[in-house]
Image (cartoon, helix red, strand yellow):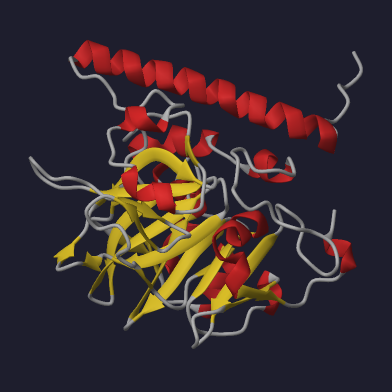
């Protein structure tokens, strides 16, 4: 039998959202069934934002489109790092395991802070989206939104307390919305990853403090630049799910999965809709958007896809280093 033809770019554009939607529907059904069996009903029907149990009134005066992600609230669970291993021992560790953890070309989120450096594999962030950690004595939240390929590391000390974040199950302009967890009677706020602040709830308008020096790059490059780096110890319980989760085809599909309020322009030296960029904060609060390879060293930087950055900060950004070939 002859090989099946490779999927075309146009075909992927239709097939990927459909496939991911189907997976999301199955996940929601499975989560709901588990909730019913345990006597608890998950919050969020996957579609209607009002079903997720958050105060959304603060969003009425904010630009942006809120959508259900297809998953209920808390379907994804943040990871709290309790132990690490030396990055220099990764090759040896991989050689002794049936499934490798991080190899040369795997992309990682890397950060050096104080006297420490650490890398968090994107394969792990794909299935957690938030990792609570402490680096250089600073409690941090490593956040990743696969739908925007965006990574931001925040200081978790906000409004007089150290926040533990949960995954809301909602997206704002196709980007991750978190919520702050608390005890009985706590009223959570919703926090926008790329908005860099709380967008609804009691803390609406409160800014998050992004940490400078965050990078997304291949593991081999991060390790070469930071030979003393550490990585979180692998979680064997999540190994199968980590291996099965990938967004590569979605990124190739050419358009966001959910609606955005400010569609990104293209052409005339601007990036393509799903092109990877790095936004670098300037001293006056504006941003410079460049290709990742042209990003200036240092400072607060946000790697993500162009459509997502434009939706949140397009009016405060200048674009440099993209030629006409970027419009595709």
Q: Position of residue 302 (x, y in %)?
A: 53, 68
Tally the marks.
0
255 lies left or right of 181: right
Q: Is residue 197 above or below residue 320?
A: above
Which residue does the image show at 75% across and 58% down from the upper left? Answer: 265
Most distant residue in the bottom direction: 283
Most distant residue in the front direction: 61
Q: Closer to the camera, 171 or 293?
A: 171
Res 111 seen here:
yes
Most distant residue in the right direction: 2
Q: Position of residue 45 (x, y in %)?
A: 39, 23
128 lies left or right of 134: right
Q: Position of residue 68 (x, y in %)?
A: 46, 33
Q: Position of residue 275 (x, y in %)?
A: 71, 57
321 lies left or right of 261: right
Res 96 seen here:
no
Q: Is residue 152 above or below residue 106?
A: below
Query: Is the N terminus in the top left, top right, bottom left or bottom right quadrant?
Result: top right
Q: Closer to the camera, 33 or 178?
A: 178
Q: Residue 103 lies in what quarter of the image? A: bottom right
Which residue does the image show at 28% across and 61% down from the upper left? Answer: 133
Which residue does the image show at 50% across and 25% down from the upper left? Answer: 24
Q: Is residue 77 above or below residue 176?
A: above
255 lies left or right of 211: right
């Amino acid at each position: 039998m002859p090989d099946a033809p490779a999927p075309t770019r146009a075909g992927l554009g239709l097939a990927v959202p459909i496939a991911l939607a189907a997976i999301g529907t199955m996940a929601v059904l499975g989560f709901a069934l588990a909730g019913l069996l345990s006597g608890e009903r998950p919050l969020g029907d996957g579609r209607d934002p009002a079903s997720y149990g958050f105060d959304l009134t603060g969003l009425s005066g904010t630009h942006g489109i809120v959508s259900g992600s297809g998953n209920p609230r808390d379907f994804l669970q943040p990871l709290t790092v309790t132990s690490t291993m030396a990055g220099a021992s990764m090759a040896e560790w991989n050689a002794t395991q049936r499934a490798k953890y991080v190899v040369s070309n795997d992309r990682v989120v890397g950060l050096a802070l104080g006297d420490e450096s650490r890398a968090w594999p994107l394969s792990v962030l794909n299935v957690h989206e938030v990792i609570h950690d402490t680096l250089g004595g600073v409690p941090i939240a490593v956040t990743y939104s696969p739908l925007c390929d965006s990574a931001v590391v925040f200081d978790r000390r906000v409004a007089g307390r150290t926040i533990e974040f949960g995954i809301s199950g909602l997206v704002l302009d196709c980007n991750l919305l978190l919520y702050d967890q608390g005890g009985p009677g706590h009223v959570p706020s919703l926090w926008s990853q790329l908005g860099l602040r709380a967008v609804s709830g009691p803390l609406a308008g409160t800014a998050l403090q992004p940490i400078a020096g965050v990078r997304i790059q291949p593991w081999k490059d991060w390790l070469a630049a930071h030979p003393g780096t550490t990585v979180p110890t692998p979680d064997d319980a999540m190994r199968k799910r980590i291996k099965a989760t990938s967004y590569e085809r979605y990124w190739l599909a050419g358009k966001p999965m959910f609606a955005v309020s400010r569609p990104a322009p293209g052409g005339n030296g601007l990036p393509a809709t799903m092109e990877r960029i790095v936004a670098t904060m300037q001293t006056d609060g504006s941003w410079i958007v460049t290709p990742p390879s042209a990003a200036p060293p240092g400072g607060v930087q946000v790697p993500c896809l162009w459509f997502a950055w434009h939706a949140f900060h397009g009016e405060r950004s200048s674009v440099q280093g993209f030629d006409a070939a970027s419009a595709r």
